[in-house]
Amino acid sequence: MMSPRVLSRSACNDFRECKVYRTAALLTLAIAVALPACAHLQAGGTGGQGGASAPADPLSSTTNGLTFEAASIRPSAQRFVLKGIDFLNPAGDEAPPPGGLFSWNVSLPWLINFAYDLRSAQERRGAREALPRWAQDEWYAIEARAEGNPTRDDVRQMVRSLLADRFQFAAHREKRESQVYALVVARPGLGLRPHPEGAPCTLSTLKVDKYTNIVPSYDAVPAHCGISSRELSHSGERRFEMLDVTMQQIADSLGLAVSPSVVDRTGLAGRYDAVLDFGPDGVPPNAASFSDEIGLPPLPAALEKELGLKLVKQNAAVEVLVVDHIGTLSEN
């Protein structure tokens, strides 16, 4: 079972959804102005997406009948202690744990992100803002067991069923015209390395030792396959580690750090290793007080310089999640 992870400025997987309250060294999920805390939300509640909407997809909110064999959900007093988020990260591809046992301590948006496969900061923000305030703020301790050997997609459907059963959650997808970032190849062969099949996920000593203040340290959290993030300085400079991942996963990771959404247009198949060090878009207000600032370029410039990839704005029809209904937690 995964160990709890305390939310701090050094441990936040949803990179643009989390921010540091630097004065108190506490981290909270960034929430825009919430809709009134009503029990029922009308379709179209994900305001701010823009563009005319296509007819709703009537199949998108079905669950295929997959449910957990047993599940318990209780309000949690351990706010800001994330448990099980590695599996719940839609940008990852972690397999279900042996025995089909799950233990999570999360807020509802984390479950919705996973259940409906919301990959970008834009999608997640829209779904979050459609929820009443209590649904954004409350945390829950969840213990669940699945029969047999469910796949990751099976568990996704089970979480949808769980949300529908315990919170009366209902949603559907619509396609809307929106601006996106297309991820394209600008300079082939620069920094992006094919991952040999079956090879371990490691980083060179040069990468590991490059920065002295990296958090979490490599002693505490070694490099591993999948998507991870580390803080390089107090000024918001970060490292994305993307090891043994597809280009779609790389696009999804970038989509958590920029807005609008990122779509893969590289045409590259296979699996890759990539490490991206970048700074914030603007100079932090009190940057002069950060003695550990490195001076890294913002993500778009770092992406092209380090990995030979580029973000190009385009218009495209994108799917958005529209929240139709949510209720308070029913009894176990």
Image (cartoon, helix red, strand yellow):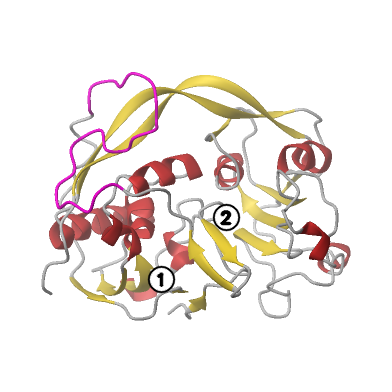
**Residue 257 vertical placement versus 204 (above, below):** above
In what quadrant of the picture does the N terminus appear? bottom left
Disc 1: CA contacts within 10 A as few (<14), some (14-19) or many (>=20): some
Decide which of 326, 150 is in the foreground and name it: 326
* Residue at image location 42% in from the left, 49% down from the top: 32
Residue 135: x and y, percent? 28, 59
Residue 258: x and y, percent? 60, 41
Instruction: Please state the total of marks drawn on the protein image.
Output: 2
Mark 2: amino acid:
Phe
Secondary structure found at label 2: loop
**Residue 121 vertical placement versus 212 (above, below):** above
Q: Earlier in the sequence, mark 1 or mark 2?
A: 2
Residue extent of the magenta highlight = 35-56
**Residue 37 vertical placement versus 261 (above, below):** below
Secondary structure found at label 1: loop
Where is mark 1, residue-wise? 97
Quick check: is 192 in the magenta stretch? Answer: no
Mark 1 and mark 2: Cα distance apart in space: 25 Å
Q: Quadrant of residue 78?
A: bottom left
Tag shown at residue 15: 2
Camera sees residue 200 = no
Disc 2: CA contacts within 10 A as few (<14), some (14-19) or many (>=20): some
In what quadrant of the picture does the C terminus appear? bottom left
Residue 164: x and y, percent? 17, 54
Residue 80 is left or right of residue 206, and the answer is: left
* Residue at image location 65% in from the left, 33% down from the top: 268
* Residue at image location 42% in from the left, 41% down from the top: 123
Camera sees residue 281 = yes
